[in-house]
Image: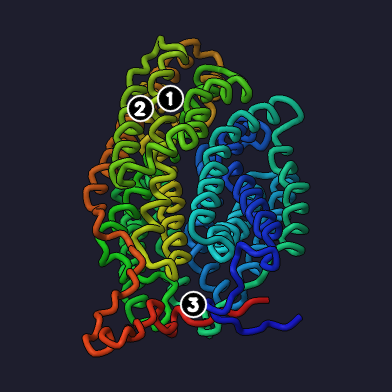
Amino acid sequence: MSDTIQTISEAPPLGRKKAGLDRRWWTLIAVCGATLMLMVDTTIVQVALPTIQRHLGANFSDLEWVMDAYALSLAVLILTWGSVSDRFGRKRIFVGGLAVFTVGSLLCGVATTPAFLIWSRASQGVGGAAMFATGLALIGQDFRGAELGKAIAAWGATVGGAVAIGPLLGGAIASGIGWRWIFFVNLPIGVVTILLSLTKMVNVRDPDAKRLDLAGLLTFSTSMFLLVFALIRGDADGWTSATIVSLFSAAAAMLLLFVVVELRQERSMFDLSLFRNPSFTGVSFATFAIGAGMFGMLTYLTLYLQNDLGYSPLGGGLRLLPCTVLAFAIPFSTRSLAARIPPGVVLGAGLVVTAGGLAAMRFVAVNSSWTVLIPGLTLTGLGIGLANPAIARVALGVVHPQRSGMASGISNTFRVAGLATGLAALGAIFQSRITSSLRPDYKTLAPRLGSAVASGGVSAAQQALPGHPGVGAAAHMAFVSGFDLILVVGAIAVMAGALLTVFIRARDFYRPPAPPTATPDLATTTAGRRPPTESATPLPSRDEGSILVR
């Protein structure tokens, strides 16, 4: 079947049987299934990191890259895939992303070295970015009005559900059938979702999308890679070394060049004009802050529970339930109340509560058990549950519906860019604090002891210095010191995001224009007639006019 041009106004009403009501809901199921797989993979791997470290002989930098290779690929390619989908169609890019993600999962499962796993995780991110970039757009093209709100709520609940089940599922699999199955489990889900997408979705593309923003892709991806690489290598090479300073400088230069390039593009992949809206700017940077300060912290919570306190992957996942269950349940239980409160207020409150939860966990001490984390985990779960739906409401609500695809793409980019940056920055601070807290004689005997403690905890320190009975206690003290510090840093980052929500204003939200009221003409009124009213629907513009449907 060939592509046919169809204007938005000519599309059949979505509620009619002819439009395929069942097909629309199958599309939603496919998108939510892919999103669940995508988001679970960001949390399920975190729980298995200590097991992966032992089986593959990975060091702390390797573990950081296992997470960052995935997040970095997502961050730099979401907007690019969104631009590509405008040209070739959302369905095609979504299905292609599913296929790449599924194959990448297979490669991760058969990895035998840290480097192979890292590159396989990067390939997962390439496919995941295509799925992330098109998922909300696929929902938006099929749903309108109140049904669109329900569909987005289902998608948001899927994200919360992924946060909830990821650590528990990852712990159960890693403790039971082995860490490789946390990747193999994606294979049947990916195949079923691909088949569902091929048979139930329609392909929609923009006829005005003639070329890709290659300059934007190159400058943005290079800037992000240089920044994350500098953060990961900073402790090993020295923060004031020529290498690290050069990497940071090059990252800043490439980011500036990216801005210049995007301002000169006729159809840029990153429309900087959206940031003229203070509310859009506020929600974007608030999203970055919670990604960096909270979601980046989950990896180190896992390392603390398993490597320092000695719990199994399943045991560690179970102890995260106060956070993960609330992150899933709160969006459902507060949906009606949140709908009556300005979303900027809800988002700000969610971030404040999340920052308070991170600060509450700051009371971890050398002799603490895991129960000291419960108040903080409870607060962070509540905060995440409030913040996630509010982010979507603000990011999509402050732009014209025709720009919702780009708005959601930018929002998701800020989310995963925050995750990638947070993982690297918190990891650098964590390892540096551990190294500085160790006794000088231990560091002399084992120069890489700080890295070993950061990635493997007390047991790694004892293996690095066998026959030194005091090294275990010293490693535990250093680990707790590093963990406490990054909790403070994470809390500050999330609170900064909360402060940025003051820029979210009710008047910035898009409101459909009301139909003009006709002014009666005396002559025609006398004759019992009224002049015709002007159409409330403007003619489609170049950006809003026609779409291609397959």
Above or below, comparing residue 525 to residue 436 in the picture: below
Q: Which image quadrant is residue 39 in?
A: top right
Residue carrying label 2: 357
Sort mark 2 into few (<14), some (14-19) or many (20+) by Cα contacts within 10 Å.
Answer: many
Q: Disc 2 vs disc 3: which is toward the camera?
A: 2
Mark 1, other Cα within 10 Å: few <14 / some 14–19 / many ≥20: many
User: How many labels, in total?
Assistant: 3
Query: Residue at coordinates 66% horizontally, 37% vertically from top-left?
Result: 56
Q: Is residue 87 visible?
A: yes
Q: Which mark is residue 76?
A: none
Secondary structure state at the residue bearing disc 3: helix
Mark 3 residue crowding within 10 angstroms, few (<14) / some (14–19) / many (20+): few
Label 1 element class = helix
Q: Is residue 505 above or below residue 164?
A: below
Taking depth in this image into account, of 132 and 416 the one nearest to the observer is: 132
Residue at horizontal 36 percent and vertical 75 percent from the top: 262
Point out residue 37 in the picture as x, y percentages from the top left corner. 64, 46
Residue for badge 3: 214
* Residue 493 in picture, x, y percent from top left: 30, 41
- Picture coordinates of residue 460 (x, y %)? 55, 24
- Amino acid at dot 2: Gly
Residue lying farthest to the front in this orientation: 527
Is residue 465 visible in the rendered image? The answer is no
Q: Quadrant of the C terminus?
A: bottom right
